[in-house]
Amino acid sequence: MDEHRQNIRERDLRRNGKSEALTIFAQATDTSIADCISERPAATTMLMEQVCASSNMAGALKRVQTNKGSYGVDGMHVEEVAEYLREQWPRIQHELFSGTYKPSAVRRVEIPKASGGIRKLGIPTVVDRVIQQAVLQVLQPLYDKTFSENSYGFRPGRSAHQAVLKAQEYIRAGYAYVVDIDLQSFFDKVNHDRLMSRLARRVEDKRLLKLVRAYLNAGIMENGLVKPATEGTPQGGNLSPLLSNIVLDELDKELLARGHRFVRYADDCNIYVKSKRAGERVMTGISRFITKRLKLKVNLAKSAVDILSNRKFLGYSFTKEAVPRIKIAPLALERFKRRVRELTNRNKRVSFAVLVKGLMVYVRGWMGYYRLCQTLSVLTALDSWIRRRIRCWLWKQWETLANRTAELVKRGVSKKDAHMTACKGRRLWATTRDKYVQLALPNAYLKSLGIKPLASFITV
């Protein structure tokens, strides 16, 4: 009977795509899959046992494999990690239990920020990402239930959309001014001692605390040299989002104690007040708290007290109306247009079908995030602009006088009008406004080819 029950549990795991990962850790620790599933030590003095439980490690491996990601300083790719862990897990597990595990340095990667400047990422090795993910899966439930309801970033079941809607709720309640606080290089400036002190209040397992400290101090490899890390929690590590919330939860608690209405998403914090004068008082007081208590820096150049319509929050902004509506921030619209220009570059030698597919994949993803937009006139204007880009691209591909005339005629334009239109020496962009070009390539026709209106992607 017991064997039959175990077979059923193993079959269910296979259906969920977890069997292979579980088997790796079950075989490596000489335990059955059924035993692995039941490993659930509860005391915070034995959290490392929870981290190393085969079911937890299997889930971490599965998540890292799903997320893919780049290689670390050892050059190992995600596709190689399962076989490596199958061979090395007994050694790694022994080191984790004994507190002797030493993480590798992170690989420095610089990527351009959408708003300008450079974002520095630290990419851990794949093995370290699996271990960090396993630690995250144990610590997240322990901490998340104590976090503020006003915190939305990097938390299960919470999203940027919820944060924006909460901000709109405050605005509509009469809090028309925002204290927009920007933390300077937050992830690079986290104080290690303060962070470890806060962790130690709830985590009693010294081995786990030592492991987290080891990850914080692992160092950064840049240009072939490893630089020591004395502060900060590198963006790119699986643990960093949770650690950032643990650090900034102290700010949340302070804001709640002072009775403020606020929304925080990671290090992006907005406090809502009813007047500019009140906002300036709040800015002074909270900036002092952040500097003195949290040992972090406020970027005064980017922080401000202003009306909501002049600021952006998570890529959104708000209209100046009596009942403010959610709109897409101007900078986000500029980035959208820049990307669409790249995708519809008139010098691209690709088929029209390939161009449309690539464009719609991007548009669908973009609108998936900006689906909260309540200013449909903006989307309508973008639709018109995109259609002009498409007409311009097609006109360029038709290229010759004879070909352009033939294409217009084929689409219902008289031969005389088609010839006159093709002969005009106007620039490509101006030509898209020509009535005969629009007659040949009407909105309905472009829609039939797959150019869907932006509003059609709004599902809420």
Image (cartoon, helix red, strand yellow):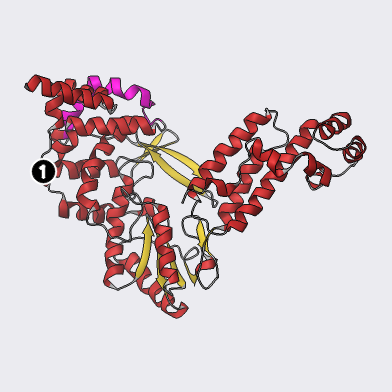
The image quarter in which residue 57 lies: top left
Question: On the rendered structure, is 167 left or right of 295?
Answer: right
Q: What residue did someone put label 1 on?
A: 42
Please report the bounds of the magenta region as a residue range.
71-96
The image quarter in which residue 163 lies: bottom left
State the residue at coordinates (29%, 44%).
216
Residue 443 in view, yes or no: yes
Is residue 37 located in the magenta-colored stretch of the structure? no
Question: On the rendered structure, is 293 left or right of 32?
Answer: right
Q: Nearer the viewer, residue 335 or 183?
A: 335
Q: Position of residue 418 (x, y in %)?
A: 88, 37
- Element assignment for label 1: loop
Is residue 171 placed above or below 317 in the rendered structure? below
Is residue 325 placed above or below 265 in the rendered structure? below
Q: Position of residue 160 (x, y in %)?
A: 41, 53
Q: Position of residue 15 (x, y in %)?
A: 27, 25
* Furthest-left residue in this view: 1
Residue 196 in view, yes or no: no
Is residue 74 located in the magenta-colored stretch of the structure? yes
The type of residue carrying mark 1 is Ala
